[in-house]
Image (spheres, coloured by chain):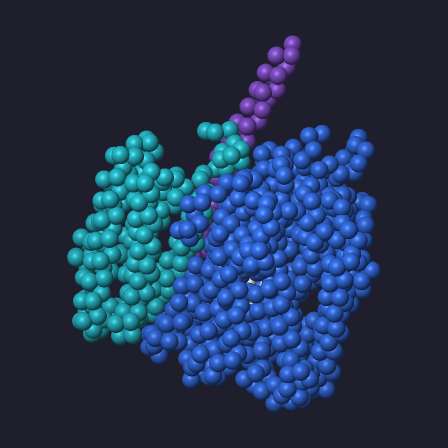
Chain colours: A purple, B blue, C cyan
Amino acid sequence: MLAIVVVAGALLADAASACTVCLGAQTEASRKAFVGTTAFLTFLPLMVVGGIIALFVRRTLAQEALDESRRAGDLDAGVESQG
Amino acid sequence: MAESIPSDSPAVADDHHGHEEPSFWSKYVFSTDHKMIAMQYMFTGMAMAVIGGFMAYAFRMQLAFPGIEVPGFGIVTPANYNALVTNHGAIMIFWVAMPVLIAAFGNYLIPLMCGCDDMVFPKLNRLSYQIFLLSAVVLLSSFFVEGGGFGGAWTAYPPLSAKAEYSLTPLGSSIWLGAVALEFVAFLLGGINFITTAMNSRAPGMKLYDIPIVIWMIVIASILFLVSVGPLIAGAIMLLFDQQLGTAFFDPARGGDPVLWQHLFWFFGHPEVYVVLLPALGITAEIITVFARKKLFGYKTVLHTTIATGVLSFTVWAHHQFISGVDPRMAHVFTLTTLLISVPIAEMMFVYIATLYGGSIRLTTPMLWGLSFIAEFLIGGVTGIFLGASGADIYFHDTYFVLAHFHYTFFPIAIIGTFAGLTFWFPKMFGRMMNDRLGKIHFWGTIIPFNFIFIPLFVLGMGGQHRRIFDYSYFPELSMPWMQDIRVLATSSLLIMLGFQVVFFYNFIVSLRSGEKASKNPWKSNTLEWTADSPPPHGNWKELPTVYRGPYEYSVPGRDEDYWPQDQPN
Amino acid sequence: MEPLGENGRSSMMPNGLFGMAIFIVAELMLFAGMISAFFIVKAAAPSWPPPGQPRLPIEATALNSLVLLASGFFLIQAHRAFHRGDRDSMRRPLLLALALGSFFVIFQGSEWVALLGQGLTLTSSSLGSFFYLVVGVHGIHAAAALILLAIATVRLRRGYLSPGFFGAAEALWFFVVGVWPVLYMVVYL
Ligand code: HEM
Ligand SMILES: [Cu+2]
């Protein structure tokens, strides 16, 4: 829903010449290039880092669980040898 | 790097801590000990803060009393003014906030709080500081070359920065750029170290959710820095080529595009503000839990909120370009994301306030700094929302409103955050307590004048006062008597604030020499650094600690003591 | 999986590899920045490639790219052998990877010389500026990675190549190999 509003709002707007010097020189192609590279630069790090972090957290949590179970195993063993 | 990587140095006490007395050079200058490197960063950062503060003094005097001979500086010429403003900004962000908050506290706290004897790449760490020191020297040298220091603002927008005919600093601008690039290399190396140590080398038993928040914040800040800095380095190389080799990357007359620089700069620039914000937030979290004797309200909430902030910080940068002719369709999206990013920040503030609620609060000096961080930063965050609305920003952009906004964010971060951390960890760092009374005098003497500097500047900004103007008397509508009075008020408050810093330095030196001896854990805190001696020896612990629980177990019902150190089995 | 990683510490992978992985992410963004800049300048240009500039050697570079990819392929073999613990059969693919990689860099260098002769210089047009910037930065990375691989070869021979060092060196080389096709498509095509 929010996404639709964002996209709709974004498309409604058109070139308002806030700065005649900059915008006057710009073509539609170059404005598209700005929008495209903005998206590229925004999402590339999020995807790369996100992927690495997801992998990392999964591995760490698995290992923590493993450690935990080993430690619990040690405890059990201790109890057994006592009893 | 090739040298240090193979020394897959396990962060565990081993034989390289031989115990013969090291020489002065190997102990203080070429040490690879993380604590010594932290101190080197800290003192270099403080020295740079003094220089940056002096610059502010000089140009604020010029603004309040145009044309006077500033005591200690002399007449401020327009070129001086530009160079002072530019380098004040650059120094405070890149040579004060970054080295002190990330490098000094990161270096000091990460191994101590994670229970390691050192960073995983100690030599890389030393190299990082050496490059940083070099960058500071290079920066300062730019003032003494022909044409003087760079004066194109800390954002270095071309074409002003790209062409010597415009900037009139043929050498200064390139030296400035080179210094910034060197500084980035230093933090790149540092960041690699921080992340690897905290993620890969923690004490046995320390799970991800047992890591103190300040460590998480420094790690996430390092990730943000490392990921965002690439495009700016690309831009800096291109700008350097434009300046020195005659390329035209940013020259519209020859097929380049000046807005491209803004694109690359702010892609880094906005995440950068969170890079310095997060460590300060983390320091505050440690302090308020200790001095409210309460568990941090929602550890996981804070952590996940921080990650959300990190993600969002990559999606807002074009809010600095609303009037640079960016596509208005893009401006819409960035308005929305900018409003969105204030949500996690606000949430974090609420979490901190909820942590305080019902605690048994002790108003020590570090706690005062921590509380004032929350209060002052809120003002900065709220005014950011006005600026984030692209419609309102067309009016506010490049006025003193923006300037006051970011000083209400940066000052709490760089100054309040640093003093909070320094007064809190001083006993650990130097083995002596700091004088609390002098600390409080310094606190009030800093906080009150600070507000009297920048609230007036908000008013001037709303009155339309533009930034980066040398002498307002050339603009009749900006030099009405009430405006000039406000400028004098701001400048006199600055003088008072700078004066009170003497109290700090006095207290620092006297406490260092003859303060009361600090015990291992004077604040009765839970985290691991307080289980080492004060100050910790080389190698930190004789036997490295094991962790049994999270860092914020204060006032747990059913225990005699109101704290529960992480390394105690029960 | 070891219960607690290196020396009783909760580590996920060798420190050297971990540090290099972080460095590579930063470098990836450096290239992303340059690619973005390239697209923006290209889109604003009235015609592309700029008039009066020599044509880039698309075919020769395509072949050279294959050499680079082959080098990456041999490094994968070395990687497999290393992790089987079979250090003897690792030497040959490692040396091949190193040799092909060096060939790539030298060939790129000779292309530069030819192009400079034909009038494509750093300042002759935005194409020239970006060409030398992007390809040059990639070349510097390639050279650095090759030096690391060479050190790894020496250490292998002397018998003390650690997983951390080899992991770091090969990660950087895989990165150099991996971004090249993208850069080729962006800059040459
Ligand atoms: C809720 C959070 C924030 C929001 C919504 C926000 C929003 C904004 C906006 C929209 C601008 C552009 C104004 C203009 O140039 O016209 C701006 C400028 C600025 N902000 Fe923030 N901001 C926030 C937090 C921060 C923080 C945490 C810092 C610093 C640590 C910071 C530092 C700056 C700086 C340095 C500038 C001015 C840059 C310049 O033009 O020189 N902001 N902010
Ligand atoms: Cu911003």
Vertically, is A37 above or below B54? above
Vertically, is C154 above or below B321? above
Measured as percent of width and height from the top left, residue C162 is found at 39, 39
Measured as percent of width and height from the top left, residue B387 is found at 60, 66
> Residue B450 vs residue C171: left or right?
right
Res. C16 visible in picture: yes
Vertically, is C154 above or below A71? below
- For this rendering, which residue is in front, B401 or B279? B279
> Residue B479 vs residue C156: left or right?
right
Residue at 42%, 76% in the rendered image: B162
- For this rendering, which residue is in front, C133 or B28? B28
> Residue A50 vs residue B106: left or right?
left
Res. B451 visible in picture: no
Total marks in image: 0
Which quadrant is the C terminus of chain B positioned in?
A: top right
Where in the image, quadrant-wise, is ligand 1 located?
bottom right
- For this rendering, which residue is in front, B517 or B298? B517
Residue at 58%, 20% in the rendered image: A74
Measured as percent of width and height from the top left, residue B73 is found at 64, 83
